[in-house]
Amino acid sequence: MSNPTALQNGPRQSAVSPAHHPAGKEHSPDAPLSIHDMTVAYHRKPVLWDVDLDLPERSLIGVIGPNGAGKSTLIKAAMDLVPKASGRVRVYGLPYRKNRKRVAYVPQRESVDWDFPVTALDVVAMGRYRRIGWCVPVTKKHREAAREALDRVGIADLADRQISQLSGGQQQRTFLARALVQDADLYLMDEPFAAVDAATEKAIVKILKDLKADGKTALVIHHDLQSVEDYFDYVVLMNMRIIAHGPTSAVFTEDNLRKTYGGKLTLLADAAEAMRRVQARS
């Protein structure tokens, strides 16, 4: 493998503590998501470098890092949506394609064509296709499950509304409902809190806590450093490679934040506030 200094602006050393990455336990077959030495490159330019990570079960996991750190690529590579230059990924011990039924995905809202002529109920029902089968009519049973999922995210009354007529927060809730209706074990969410109203954010937090209570695992790309400690019990700090990962109380520290953001953390107002909270806690 080529020299990691080829990553021009990325961090040069991993700050993962052995206490949070014990030898012999890195790649348990029971891990919801296990990533082995994964590198991803676009046009020969590395985006992720030597990612090696196991996620703990029954946890709410926040993926934290600056723009361009490869957070979305991490999820997409795990789901085989982008090719890997090297490494492998396992979902509960199996390749993703053999265990995809155990995974639900919430994409970034900006990546969706919201002008597509379908209702909120139609979108949620799409989450049942792995059970129904493609090109097979959606039965009453599956539509009822979709309505229940919409009710769970608080927009059951909007089931028959075209998705283009929904607000940003309502659209995000619709895609969250589509993930919930799959009844997966591992939920991969790409910035579900981005540009949503306070009520929607509160609803998403409740859903995440309910998922954990049900024994599920959620990996959530998150950008608001001030809420990390409140929302997640485990964090992955990354900037093209893993900087640190482990329980939030141990890993979400001023030192690791500075390493993650390249020493420019104080330029960001929300990050500065997060650091003050960390300092107050220690």
Image (tube, rainbow, N blue to C red):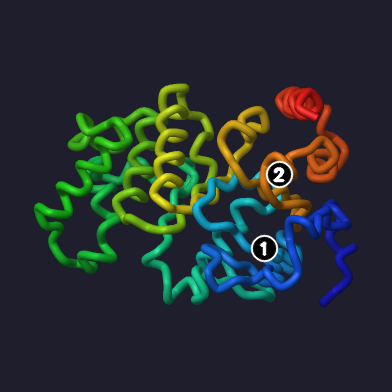
Numbered label attached to residue 257: none
Give the position of the C terminus as an image quadrant.
top right
Q: Are marks 2 and 1 in contact (CB under 8 Å)?
A: no
Residue 131 placement, left or right of 216: left
Q: Quadrant of residue 75?
A: bottom right
The spot of residue 24 in percent (x, y) is 71, 73
Percent x, y for residue 178?
A: 32, 48
Q: Residue at x 71, y 68 (%)?
A: 39
Q: Amino acid at mark 2?
A: Gly
Mark 1: give few (<14), some (14-19) or many (20+) Cα within 10 Å: many
The residue shown at (63%, 35%) is: 228
How many angstroms separate mark 2 from mark 1 (CA)?
16 Å
The residue lying toward the viewer, choosing from 113 and 223, is 223
Viewer-nearest residue: 233 or 83: 233
Residue 13 position within the rendered picture, expressed as x and y whole percent measured from the top left: 87, 57
**Mark 1: which secondary structure?**
strand
In this view, 266 is above or below 260: above
Residue matched to label 2: 65
Of residues 221 and 277, the one drawn nearer to the viewer in this rendering? 277
Work out whether 165 lies above or below 116. above
Q: Which residue is mark 1?
A: 53
Considering the numbered disc 2 on the image, is that residue within a helix, a strand or a loop? loop
Q: Position of residue 270 (x, y in %)?
A: 71, 25
**Relative horizontal placement of residue 185, taking residue 66 as reference (left or right):** left
Marked residue nearer the N-terminal end (2 or 1): 1
Q: Is residue 213 above or below residue 184?
A: above
Answer whether residue 268 is visible to the viewer in this image.
no
Q: Is residue 134 left or right of residue 64?
A: left
Residue 265 visible, this angle = yes
Would you call the spot at circle 2 few (<14 residues within 10 Å), some (14-19), or many (20 or more)?
many
